[in-house]
Image: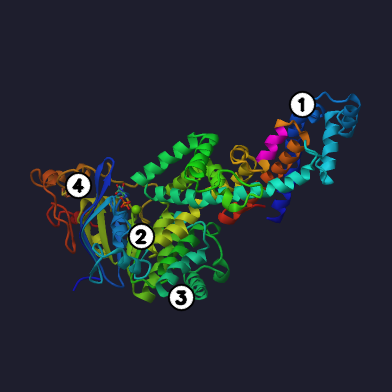
Amino acid sequence: MGRYVIRRLLQMIPVFIGSTFLIFFMVYALGDPVAALFGDKAPDPATAARIRQELYLDAPLWKQYLHYMAQILTGNFGTAFNGQDVLELMADAFPVTLRLTIVAILFEIVIGITLGLLSGLRRGRSVDTSVLLATLVVVSIPTFVSGYVLQYLFGVKWAVVSPSVSPAAPFDQLLLPGAVLALTSLAYVTRLTRTSIAENSRADYLRTAVAKGLPRHRVVTRHLLRNSLIPVVTFIGTDIGALMGGAIVTERIFNIHGVGYQLYQGILRQNSPTVVGFVTVLVIVFLVANLIVDLLYAVLDPRIRYA
Amino acid sequence: MTAFLSVRDLSVRFATEDGVVRAVDGLSFDVERGRTLGIVGESGSGKSVTNLSVLGLHDPRTTEIEGRILLDGQDLTTAPESVLEKLRGNRMAMIFQDSLTALSPYYTVGRQIAEPFRKHTGASRREARLRAIEMLRKVGIPNPALRVDDYPHQFSGGMRQRAMIAMALVCDPELLIADEPTTALDVTVQAQILDLLKDLQQQTGSAIVLITHDLGVVAGTADDVLVMYAGRAVERGTAREVLRSPRHPYTWGLLGSMPRLTSPVDEPLTPIPGSPPSLLDPPPGCPFHPRCAYVDRVGGDRCRTERPEPPEGRGAACHLPDGAGRGRTR
Ligand SMILES: Nc1ncnc2c1ncn2[C@@H]1O[C@H](COP(=O)(O)OP(=O)(O)O)[C@@H](O)[C@H]1O
Ligand code: SF4
Ligand SMILES: [Mg+2]
């Protein structure tokens, strides 16, 4: 196991370099960061030249990348468009998005798994059909539509929650945005749980469990549910990375100053250090989440052994 | 005085998309404590369905069960689920054919053996673990204190089957149903497992139902025999009676297709020609008549129109006069 983890960590290095280089290349090749810094004004040629030199912008791209990475490793992510340290921006934004992600994941786990279990146990009956239909509807509505509609209904019309989130972004204000963020994944979790339950409920070892005299609730929780959750846990684990980086729409709707918001601002204002810095951290989050999922998999299914 | 397990006029029907499957039809048999009943028949003859009914393991939404199943005088067909839960794994237990799929891959062998023990005796985790180790030792697993923490996939096929026997016997059941417990195993291991079952029966005096499609297994293990065909009993008797002087043409066929140690290796086995009838639409009269070579020996059209009476005690469900098969004894 230990050896496996080390090998996986080593494998992450080329993936990390490849993906960060790609994003670095796209961001720096597609815009002129100096011009972006000056906004609509034409830059003073002397200042522009100085900045170019500071940022190694005249050097070949791979040298710029090396320079940038070296800077990052010393904790210097550069400055954002408003002169703030990107590192500071991240220190503010990541905890917010992390809280949002936690709320969303909790929705996925509690509601998604419950609905999936119910419909999986009652295959072909009305509960099952309605749940399936609902998940179809949810999956086919884009987040910005469901986000604005729910914001209007809960935040404005019935005014049960505040329609926008304060900069501190406490958990209670993140309930509605978390639900919006979770919606699509929640539908997938429901369907995945249902399929898995339906498949496993025909398994021979469930009949054995009944033949042992276990009561039904024990058969369902200890044997059926536990075993059916393996693919679901995998999905939710990988979803953490996706939710962290994919909250751009939700964070804009509810004015949450998280990762998605800062990324959006960075792109809008063509601020390369912000974009590349945030994406770099997201890549790391993704890679680590994937590793944890793989390790979890081995814990949940004893037949899988990593060496 | 009824037997310890007494099945009377059992019928099991499944509602399927294609129609109603009559998997078991008017079946009766008895098993006494300390005795072994061998249930024999080709694959699909209703052996498993019958015994799953005894434990009440069919899905009640799609299954219709008629008749009576008496365990120690108590009718299981009308017993509520809560009563069945207390009996299953405790007073009656089942060993399934495929130990790889019948054991959960996600729990250790020890925990799976301990689970029914804790449920039925209220033992602590520690006590149940010790009991699991003791059971593994009893069924002949070497190093039981170590192997108790293994997962099923770490066991060989024969050891898994032993572990399943340990699981079934952990509460000392009075009725043990073994559904083709040795079919997936090679011959040597098969003999060991059957010996093990016999040994354990001598210690506990339990009633055993041994399901098999192999008359050879019956010959060595069973006291009584029930031959099933298309969901019905076609012949009943003691093992000696059925093997020495079989009365039903189907049993003759089964015996004919059994390899004999005395016959030359290259002598072809004679399987019964044809295949079992559809249980969706069973043939009228005797269900065996489309494959039977003796239809003409019975007067008129009786085999095709009139259903032979199921055997009570020693007997066969056949219109042939008693003694017609005398020349067939081996
Ligand atoms: N749950 C079920 N639904 C419909 N048909 C079934 C079901 N279980 C068994 N059968 C059918 O009942 C017949 C008897 O099956 P079974 O008892 O398993 O035979 P065997 O003698 O080989 O154990 C088979 O034709 C099988 O297809
Ligand atoms: S009743 Fe007729 S068809 Fe059926 S087994 Fe006897 S002889 Fe054959
Ligand atoms: Mg069977």
Q: Are marks 4 and 1 in contact (CB under 8 Å)?
A: no
Instruction: Check the residue under mark 1 and report the chain it is in.
Output: A
Looking at the picture, which amino acid does disc 4 mark? Pro
The residue wearing badge 3 is B123
Q: Nearer the viewer, mark 1 or mark 2?
A: 1
Residue at left 34%, top 47%? B269
The residue wearing badge 4 is B287
Q: CA distance from mark 2 to mark 4?
A: 25 Å
In the depicted structure, whether residue A183 falls above or below residue B31: above
**Percent position (x, y) of residue A233?**
55, 50
Instruction: Check the residue under mark 4 and report the chain it is in.
Output: B
Q: Residues within 10 Å of mark 3 (few under 14, many from 20)?
A: some
Instruction: Check the residue under mark 2 and report the chain it is in.
Output: B
Q: Are marks 2 and 3 in contact (CB under 8 Å)?
A: no
Instruction: Check the residue under mark 3 and report the chain it is in.
Output: B
Q: CA distance from mark 2 to mark 3?
A: 36 Å
**Percent position (x, y) of residue A255?**
62, 41
**A263 in the magenta segment:** yes
The residue wearing badge 2 is B217
